[in-house]
Amino acid sequence: MTTDQTEPVLPGRVFIALGAAMFMVMGVSLMLGPLLVDLAEDFHTSVAVTGQLASATFIAWAIVAPLVGPISDSYGRRPIALTGLGLVTVGLVGSGLAVNYEMIFAFRTITGIGSAMIPPNSGGVIADILPPRSRGKYFGRLIGVATVGSALIVPVTALLSGAGSWRIPFLAFGVMAAVVWAMSWRWFPASQSVVSQSLTLVTRFKQIGSNGMLWYVIASNAAQRMVYFAMFSYLAAYLTETYGKSTGDTALPLALVGLGAILGAFVGSVVAGRAARLAVASACSLGGGIAAVVLFSAGISEWMVIALGFSVAAFFSIGWPVLTTRLTELAGPSTATALGFFAASNQLGAVGGSAIGGLALAIGGFSMVGVFCLAVAAVAATVLRFKVQESPEFSRALGSV
């Protein structure tokens, strides 16, 4: 049998542009954690209130994400990429210059709108250039780069803020976003022809809306993201208020927790190809919830808290590629539409994690945040165990039927 010796590849400069944008938007979406205490002091409010700044970003992302795919298909990838990165730049610089809570809230919303444009659009570029069999490794690489971004930018935020002011990280990352925009201007590929027009936007939405199991996958993902973001959003504040750490002192613990997310994503990319992938994702969800409730309990050592944070990040990062893979199997010809809703579920989960986590903090302190995490994680595990079935085609391919 003859095989093609020249497997299609994504041009290096294109991947660098896509990867830099993904690194940027995933990182800045999580950067607020180390800044919550300082922001609360500067704007004369509580940590629970400043935690809602994360909600502004994630709500904007959740609203825009489902619309980005169809718009990108109609008007091209390049304009969407440049517009999104431009908005991220404006949002970051504006946040760094904000003089009151309302102003920074508005600019975090702008950051969320711009960030929402990047992941679906980047996936569209890969789909434009590569045939289906060659896309998987590049999607995996982009997810890896994004995970590194989310893991690194948080501790770097803590270091920059500890060195001077909470404004420094916003301004520094605003400059970085401008550099990424310039890189995309030079290297982002010209928009290609619109993909299949045989299905209208309404038809695609109807297809996705009628697929019940697909929505169970999305719901489980939203619940898992909720726990992940609740832990990440309030971990730095917990270390500061419970263990007397300064903002700068939280950099190393947050970096170690970020390593858990990177490790989990790598393990998840392997688990996603195994027969027991859904069972593993369900078990990891429950395990992550248990780790979170112990993490936020009083009476354990600081390093035990960090180890448990590492575990929570790893557990929920293992499940992410598993759920993404199952979603694409269920989506049929409307994969981009489904991924738009999946991206929205990530942000809705983040909103729930930061907003309801803040409410739990205000009601019962950090221990109540842990109880909230366990309850939501248990729901996600139950949905995965009893409502999401394995693909028969996937099982047959593995010889397990």
Image (cartoon, helix red, strand yellow):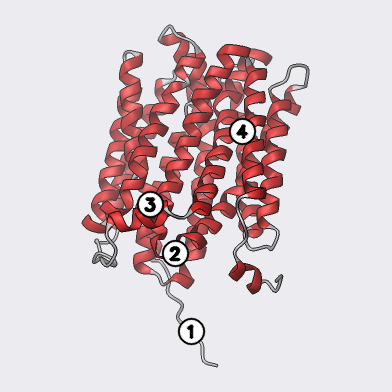
Decide if residue 332 is in sight here.
yes
Mark sitting on residue 120: 3
Q: Nearer the viewer, residue 38 or 183?
A: 38
Q: Disc 2 marks which amino acid?
A: Gly
Sequence-first tag of 1 and 2: 1
Q: Position of residue 2 (x, y in %)?
A: 51, 92
Disc 4 on helix, strand or loop?
helix
Of circles 4 and 3, the one toward us is 4
Q: Is residue 89 above or below residue 249?
A: below
Tell me the CA gap for discs 4 and 3.
27 Å
Q: Disc 1 marks which amino acid?
A: Gln
Tell me the CA gap for discs 1 and 4.
48 Å
Of circles 3 and 1, the one toward us is 3
Tell me the CA gap for discs 3 and 1.
30 Å
Q: Position of residue 257 (x, y in %)?
A: 64, 35
Sequence-first tag of 3 and 1: 1
Residue under pointer 1: 5
Tell me the CA gap for discs 2 and 3.
17 Å
Sequence-first tag of 2 and 3: 3
Sequence-first tag of 4 and 3: 3
- CB atoms of marks 4 and 3 within 8 Å: no
Compared across the picture, whether 264 is left or right of 152 comes to right
Disc 3 on helix, strand or loop?
helix
Of circles 1 and 2, the one toward us is 2
Tell me the CA gap for discs 4 and 2.
29 Å
Task: Please name the residue shown 26% across and 47% down the image.
Answer: 82
Mark sitting on residue 332: 2
Mark sitting on residue 376: 4
Q: Is residue 319 above or below residue 100?
A: below
Task: Please name the residue shown 31% across and 14% down the image.
Answer: 99
